[in-house]
Every structure is written in C-alpha cells, then in structure tokens.
C-alpha cells in the first residue's frame, strides 16, 4: 500500500472504525485513541496490510487489542492503589445523555459486545467474525444469540409494559 493509498484508506475508514470501536467499548474518547494508535501501527506496516487484503479488519483487531491492554493496565493500577491503602482519584461516570443502546451494550460481556458490533455494525458474517476474533463459529453464534436476548431485555420500554398491564 503506497502512502497515497494508505491516506485514502485512512480517510475512508477512520470514522467507521471509530464508530465501531465506540460501540464495542462504550467510550468515544477511548475508541478514538485506540483507532488512532492502530492506524499509527498500520502506517509502519502498510506494505504488509495490502498483502493481507483486509486492512480494515487488521486495524479493528489491533484497536481492540490496544483497548484490552489498556483495561488490563487500569486494573493493575487500581489494584496497586488498593494494595497501597489509598483510593484512586474519583473519575466521573458517563454523562446522563449517553445513548441508550451504548449503555445497554456496556452491560454486556466484552466478547458479546464485540461480536454484536462486528456482526451488526461491521456487517461481518459469522465466519468472518470467527476468523477475526479467533473464536469458533459456534461460539460466535452463541454470543450473537445471548447478546441479542440480553439487549432485548435491557432495551424494553417500561412505559409500554405498564400501559399493557392497565
């Protein structure tokens, strides 16, 4: 992939990938950071990206792995704070105007959230998700079924149920 091709790929894919990672992570700033970092890593490997034929999947996978590494780092840092007998500084939670779907997705296990995002936002098939995540196709299907059921439960409108009971 030439410099110009990479720049064009970046221009076409950065917004889409950031949106996909936002849904997976539930944090827009984190999604922006890991996608940018993944593109930086992709820049130095742009010749190999072209040979694989799936540069967007490569960037998305790298961004996901960066996010997981950051979670692990934060967990280790929090554990260190607690071992030292000191509480970490308070960080404000999400703003009340968060999108309902993102809030519901946030409650799902990370792998289910990732699988649902890859299937519905990235429009990947079960086989493509399995190849990208390293999961078996049956595990991907299980994550999709369980994730859809959990979302359906979390996204029910209690006002509709109350009016049906009357």
Image (cartoon, helix red, strand yellow):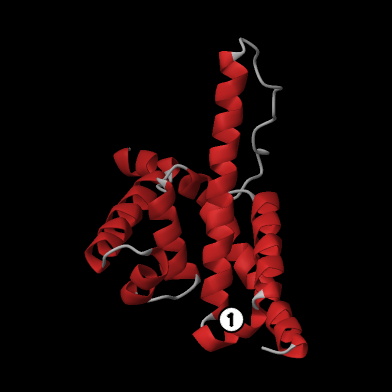
Q: Residue at x 71, y 78 (%)?
A: 10
Question: Where residue 31 appears, x then y in whole percent?
Answer: 64, 56
Q: Is residue 162 left or right of residue 105?
A: left
Q: Residue at x 53, y 40 (%)?
A: 72
Asked if 146 appears above or below 132 in the picture, the reply is above
* Image quadrant in which you'd find residue 6: bottom right
Identify the residue position indicated by label 1 in the image: 49
Question: Where residue 55 appears, x then y in whole percent?
Answer: 57, 79
Q: Quadrant of the N terminus?
A: bottom right
Q: Which one is nearer the viewer's eye here, 52 or 9?
A: 52
Asked if 67 appears above or below 123 in the picture, the reply is above
Can residue 23 be seen?
no
* Image quadrant in which you'd find residue 148: bottom left
- Name, please, the residue furthest toward the top: 85
Disc 1: CA contacts within 10 A as few (<14), some (14-19) or many (>=20):
some
Q: Residue at x 26, y 60 (%)?
A: 139
Q: Residue at x 25, y 58 (%)?
A: 142
Can residue 114 be seen?
yes
Q: Is residue 146 left or right of residue 93?
A: left
Q: Which one is nearer the viewer's eye here, 84 or 109?
A: 84
Question: Where residue 80 appears, x then y in whole percent?
Answer: 59, 22
Q: Is residue 54 left or right of residue 144?
A: right
Q: Please give the count of numbered marks on the rendered protein.
A: 1
* Image quadrant in which you'd find residue 36: bottom right
Identify the secondary structure beneath mark 1: helix
Q: Is residue 8 left or right of residue 74?
A: right
Q: Quadrant of the C terminus?
A: top left
- Name, please, the residue furthest toward the left: 138
Question: Where residue 141 appears, x then y in whole percent?
Answer: 26, 64
């Amino acid at each position: 992939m030439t410099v110009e091709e990479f720049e064009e790929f970046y221009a076409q894919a950065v917004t889409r990938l950031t949106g996909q990672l936002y849904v997976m992570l539930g944090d827009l700033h984190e999604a922006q950071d890991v996608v940018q970092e993944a593109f930086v890593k992709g820049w130095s490997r742009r010749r190999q990206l072209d040979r694989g034929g799936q540069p967007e999947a490569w960037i998305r996978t790298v961004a996901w792995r960066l996010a997981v590494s950051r979670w692990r780092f934060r967990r280790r840092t929090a554990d260190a704070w607690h071992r030292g007998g000191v509480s970490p500084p308070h960080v404000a939670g999400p703003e009340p105007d968060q999108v309902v779907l993102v809030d519901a997705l946030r409650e799902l296990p990370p792998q289910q959230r990732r699988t649902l995002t890859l299937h519905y936002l990235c429009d990947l098939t079960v086989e493509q998700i399995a190849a990208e995540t390293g999961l078996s196709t049956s595990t991907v299907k299980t994550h999709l079924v369980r994730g859809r059921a959990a979302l359906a439960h979390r996204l029910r409108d209690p006002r509709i149920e109350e009016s049906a009971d009357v």
